[in-house]
Image (cartoon, rainbow, N blue to C red):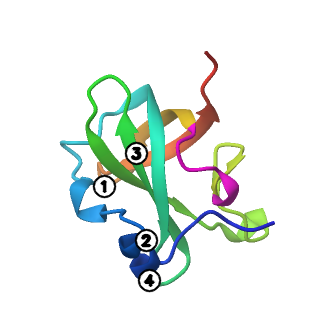
Amino acid sequence: METTVLEFFPALEAGYDPKNYSYAKEDVPIGTYPAKLDFMLWSKSGLTINCFFTLVDSHKKITLSVYRKAANQGRYLAGETEVRYLPFGSELVLTVETNELGKPLLTDMVTRKH
C-alpha cells in the first residue's frame, strides 16, 4: 500500500505550503477538536511525519507530528490510527495534550463521524 506522505519538494511542487501552518504552542489548541488533514510531509530524518491540518471551527492552520515508535513495528500511530495512509482531505477529530515540555502532542486522531 502506498503512503500518502509527501517528500518536501514534491509537496511544494504540488502546491502545498508548510509555511502557512504553525506549530507554535500558542497557536495549537489543547483538547479534542475537529480538523481537516490538508497534507503530510516526511521529516528530514524520516522518523517523523508532519501532519498539516486546518481546524474546522477557526480555520486556523496548524501542524502536529507523529513519531515512529519502536514498539509499534515501524508504524506511525496517533492513538490507534496509522497515519501514513490517510487520504488528504480526511475529516478527523484530534486529541492534543501537552508533553513534559509544555509542547502540543498529538495523542489521538480518529475519523470524524457526521
**Range of magenta residues:** 84-90
92 relative to 1 in the view: left or right: left
**Nearer to us: label 4 or label 3:** 3
| SS state under label 4 | loop
Which residue is under mark 1? 101
Crowd tier of the residue under label 1, counting other residues whose Cα lies within 10 Å: few below 14, some 14–19, many 20 or above: few
Q: Earlier in the sequence, mark 4 or mark 2?
A: 2
The residue under label 1 is which amino acid type?
Answer: Leu
What is the spatial separation of the Cα atoms under label 1 and label 2, in whole angstroms?
30 Å
Element type at mark 3: strand
In the rendered structure, which disc, 1 or 4, sits on the residue that comes first in sequence? 4
On screen, 61 above or below 85? above
Mark 2 neighbour density, 10 Å: few (under 14) some (14–19) many (20 or more): some
Q: Nearer the viewer, mark 2 or mark 3?
A: 2
Q: Alpha-carbon distance for marks 1 and 4?
A: 22 Å
Q: Residue at x 73, y 71 (%)?
A: 74
Please identify the residue farthest to the front as the structure is shown. 14
Does the segment drawn in magenta span residue 8? Answer: no
Q: Nearer the viewer, mark 1 or mark 4?
A: 4
Where is mark 4, residue-wise?
A: 44
Viewport quadrant of the C terminus: top right
* Residue 105: image location, x then y, percent: 43, 48
Using the numbered discs, state the Cα–Cα distance from disc 1 to disc 3 in whole angstroms.
22 Å
Is 86 one of the magenta-colored residues? yes
Residue, disc 3:
53
Measure how far apart labels 2 and 3 are at the Cα level.
15 Å
Instruction: Give the label on residue 9, or none.
Output: none
Q: Amino acid at mark 3?
A: Phe
Instruction: Count numbered badges in the picture.
Output: 4
User: Could you tell me which residue is drawn at 57 percent across and 40 percent down?
Assistant: 90
Residue at mark 2: 11
